[in-house]
Image (spheres, coloured by chain):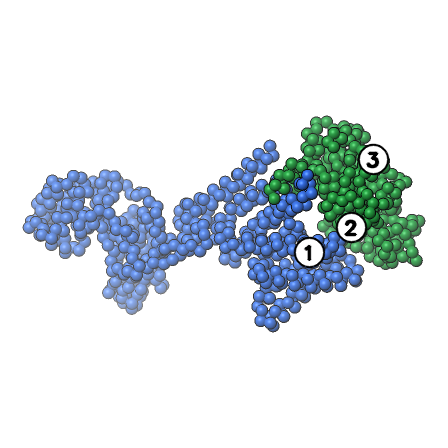
Amino acid sequence: MFLTWLNLRHAGVIGMNRRNADFILRYNERSLYPLVDDKLRTKQLAIAAGIAVPQLYGVIEIEHDIANIPNIVRDYKDFVIKPAHGSGGNGIAVIIGRINERFQYNNGSLLTEEELEYHISNILSGMYSLGGQPDQALIEYRVKFDPLFESVSYRGVPDIRTIVFRGIPVASMVRLPTRLSDGKANLHQGAVGAGIDLNSGMTTRAVWQNRPIDIHPDTGSVISGLAIPHWNKLLTLAAQCYELVGLGYLGVDVVLDHELGPLVLELNARPGLSIQIANGKGMEKRLEYIDHLNKIPEKAQDRAALAQSLFKAEN
Amino acid sequence: MRQLHLLFLTLLLCSIGLGLAVYKVNTLGLPLTASKQTEVWNVEARISFKAKPDSGVKVSLPLPLNTSGYTILNEDFVGANYGLATEQDEGGRVALWAKRRAQGKQLLFYRAVIFENDEKVADSSKIPSYPTVPDYPEHFLPVIQGLLDKSRQQSADTISFAQQVIQQLNATAPAPELKLLIEHINTSKNLAKEISWILAGARIPARIIQGLRLHDGKRYSELETWVQVHDGKQWRTLNTKDGQEGLPANFVIWQIGDQKTFSVEGGTEISLQFSVAKALRELVDVAESRAILKGSRIMEFSLYSLPVQTQNVYKVLLMIPLGAFVVVLMRNLIGIKTFGTFMPVLIALAFRETELAWGLGLFCLIVGLGLLLRAYVEQLKLLLIPRLASVLTMVVLLMVGTSVVMHKLGLEMGLSVALFPMVIMTMTIERMSLAWEEVGPVEAFKQGAGSLLVATIGYLVMNIDELQHLLFVFPELLLVVLAATILFGRYSGYRLTELWRFRALAKR
């Protein structure tokens, strides 16, 4: 056991306590949390700053407005409903189409309008929000993900999580939904995590259920060696989010739309540590290096480039 | 810098906490372990007499003093309808009972609880001046002169001089010229007083002391008398029979000097009796009484000054920080997931009342049934708050049902289910069913089991009697717990479960 401890220290793996004590508590000001915890505010900020996000169709704030749902989605075949204060992908309903007056869920099941309204009502009452406070429901554009991911995801939307420390991207992974994860993109719920080389934007290796894998468990396609499209743009986008909310230690979730390119899905003030497993590498060295940097480039583009050159040598 | 600050703070907290505790142990004698008892002596003076008709009654009784080696923890006076006053001056302390009219046999009591300690009380009495030579009656003068001269020749200092005098007066075959003097002394029945009277002829300061030997179950009809001689530095005690120096063990001095005397006015058939009995008392009580006598403010502000009911509440409350500390260890050091941060502590508190096995069983029963009902309520698509309220109502009904059924079955422990915090149970059911839906039953059970494990460990720690006693007598030890908690607040090493989580990274 002690040997494992030493090996992990040697590999520069960051633990939960370390992340909280040395990075989140030091670099993330409490007063900024609402900016990322409330997806509506994040979205509004992003739109104002010209950062690409999925289009917002409507917001439902009170129970009474639920009746308004048909009007909001009338023009859209597919859409996503999510709680403004949700976490871990909970409470997100992805509607991929309509069949016989019913809404088709992304796992294939059909929902009546009543059931959809109940789901929204649950969101409003705070079922999915931290601490159970009353919440809002966002209705937004459903991302048509890039065909690249078609072969390596099972339903759901694969997203790219990047840890941004003091505005500089530190590590990246793509999270691929599986049958086990029920279309969700969280590693602990059974999604596949694939590490991405920051410099080239190629997937390196993949982890599923804490074990290294080569092929997707549901689709059977090889995961490593995929080139993420628009990689430089994506990395810059992630770096930009630092200015957007001012959090020093930030998780940025980006989705790739096949028409619109990278879109920021959500930000996270307490991003998880599984990204280290996906990359097969601890983050300690990179974080400490940036921690000791005196000068951080002002432009997001420069910070993304800095990350690419800094961590190229490491591999 | 921050680390240094933290270290300094924890050291400060530890030293205040431990320092206070050490002071209380060493100086006030508070016990470190629970229910430690110590010996005390109950000393009683019993005065009985027959009141003379048609006259007032006045009784005066010299009272014991706090002397070297003994402390009077408390005392009380018993006398039906008697007015009581105590007086204290340089000559000593005295109790005065008075009654205008009394009839028949009268009983008065003085009781003191005396605690033997190791402390030496400095003799505060002033160095006495040399007494003037008394005017001895003419027929004694040459005899006393001769006695003193002879003793002077056979002695080296004040003490051996006094011892010589005592020995000659007590000799089995006294010198013929002393016979008359000895006869005179025997008639006065107060040897010590006569000795000091004779020693005054050589201008040696002497006084008499009276006291009791503490032997369990003994009765005495009078106090023992000793003579004390001042050697220029201190008073030294001599036996009036053989001149041996030093008080016997277990001797408590009742009275110094003879200015105060026992007397009863308006009574006949007077008798005074002393009795001694050994008793056991809680060391904490003794320490408390002593601290008050010493004028220490600490015990005055201790938890013992609160009403007993409040004390019992604090006995439990003081353990909660320990339970919270267990949660800190379990979550930040081990990495066990629980429902809610301090939910396990509250469950552990409930376990204190139900006992562990019953507690675990009842908890699982209620939560299990609650989960079933919650699954049914889920079908009704209720809003969050009404849903929580209905689950709460069901939990209360389940508790009532369990109690009644258990009672019918004759399982009285089942009644203690009423002590479970029902709001906590409701939230546990709600969170568990949410976790069930969102991350699957395995994770839900994992967190449920984690909560119960932490609650069990918390219960085991909070139920250690010794710890409970320590924290109640020395609540300042919570500062040490606080210091340890603060230290863990900066622990940035791995959690035990992370060694497993990141094991794939450790292999490389």
Question: Where residue B189 sits in the image (x, y, percent)?
Answer: 17, 55
- Quadrant the C terminus of chain B occupies: top right
User: What's the residue at 25%, 62% (across, down)?
Assistant: B271
Which numbered tag is attached to residue A231?
3
User: What's the residue at 32%, 48% (across, down)?
Assistant: B69
The CA span between labels 3 and 1 is 41 Å
User: What residue type is disc 2 on?
Assistant: Ser
Look at the image and give the colour of chain A: green
Mark 3 element type: helix
For the residue carrying disc 1, how many other residues have a C-alpha within 10 Å: few (<14), some (14-19), or many (20+)? some
User: What's the residue at 81%, 38% (across, down)?
Assistant: A225
Q: Chain of mark 3?
A: A
In the foreground, B508 or B311: B508
Give the image quarter of residue A211.
top right
Which residue matches tag 2? A181
As drawn, is B135 to the left or to the right of B343? left
